Image: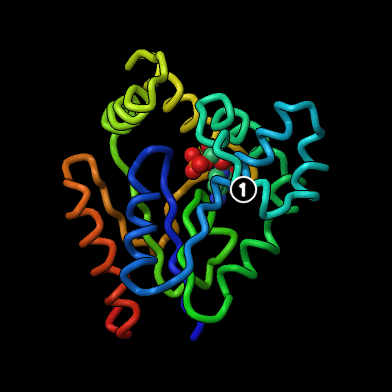
Amino acid sequence: MIFTVAIDGPAAAGKGTVSRAVADHFGFRHLDTGLLYRAVGARMLAGEDAVAAAEALSPDDLRSPDLRTQDVAAAASRVAVVPEVRAALVAFQRGFARSEGGAVLDGRDIGTVICPEAEAKLYVTASPEIRAERRFAELVARGAEVTLAGVLEDVLARDARDMGRAEAPLRAAGDATLIDTSDMAVEDAVAAAIAAVEVRRSGRG
Ligand code: DC
């Protein structure tokens, strides 16, 4: 059984939580494609050429606990504008998407570029202010010294770079189901996502 769920949206909109819950619910594998760009960003920060790093990426690179920092997130967003970096990561993502047993991929260009043929597509978003508040709370809980204004600035800068780049910019696919989580509890966002995928699985959508 081949079934791809493509989940796109801006940083800190709740994509990760929704994607993991959808994968668990349907028994599908999950790939957080942001980790690929973060791993390349981390290797660039360590002094490597970004394209060479993308071409040499291995599964072990995705397991590093350091990929969750704000510095690595910003570096990921910077290497993600380089067409050769994106090209080096396409085959792995497509192979994962079409692997047997069903797959959920979350990122920025899954429904538009990586898997335009995905059986189900979601676009998960929230206002920049709400996303900044959530990310701020997460960072403070991890002991980071940040301000809400600083986190909002990062969120807006990352949105501008992810949406404004020439190559595979962040946008909703025409046939994606939009889920705005600004005023939603996590469990409601998860339920909405599962319901949208279920409609496609049963051929009703
Ligand atoms: O989802 P994330 O915050 O882990 O992603 C980090 C950066 O990687 C994001 O700012 C842009 C880039 N990215 C991308 O360009 N395409 C994807 N499919 C996933 C992430």
Residue 111 visible in the picture: no
Residue 103 visible in the picture: yes
x, y percentage for residue 35? 57, 46
x, y percentage for residue 69? 51, 29
x, y percentage for residue 130? 26, 31
Quadrant hosting residue 51: top right
Q: Is residue 90 left or right of residue 106?
A: right
Please report the residue visible at 32 percent of the width from the left and 85 percent of the height from the top: 203
Q: Nearer the viewer, residue 177 or 185?
A: 185
Ligand 1's quadrant: top right
Please report the residue visible at 41 percent of the width from the left and 61 percent of the height from the top: 174
Please report the residue visible at 35 percent of the width from the left and 13 percent of the height from the top: 147
Dividing the image into 4 quarters, which one contains the C terminus? Answer: bottom left
Q: Nearer the viewer, residue 82 or 91?
A: 91
Label 1 near ligand 1 (CB < 8 Å):
no
Q: Is residue 14 left or right of residue 9?
A: left
How are the residues colored?
rainbow
How many marks on residues? 1
In the picture of the structure, the residue carrying the numbered disc 1 is 62
Please report the residue visible at 39 percent of the width from the left and 66 percent of the height from the top: 23
Task: Count residues near mark 1 (Cα–Cα under 10 Å), then give few for <14, some for 14-19, many for 20+.
Answer: some
Amino acid bearing label 1 = Leu
Compared with 26, 161 (above or below) is above
Judged from the image, the secondary structure of the residue bearing numbered disc 1 is: helix
x, y percentage for residue 3? 47, 77
Compared with 32, 144 (above or below) is above
Q: Nearer the viewer, residue 164 or 135?
A: 135
Quadrant hosting residue 85: top right
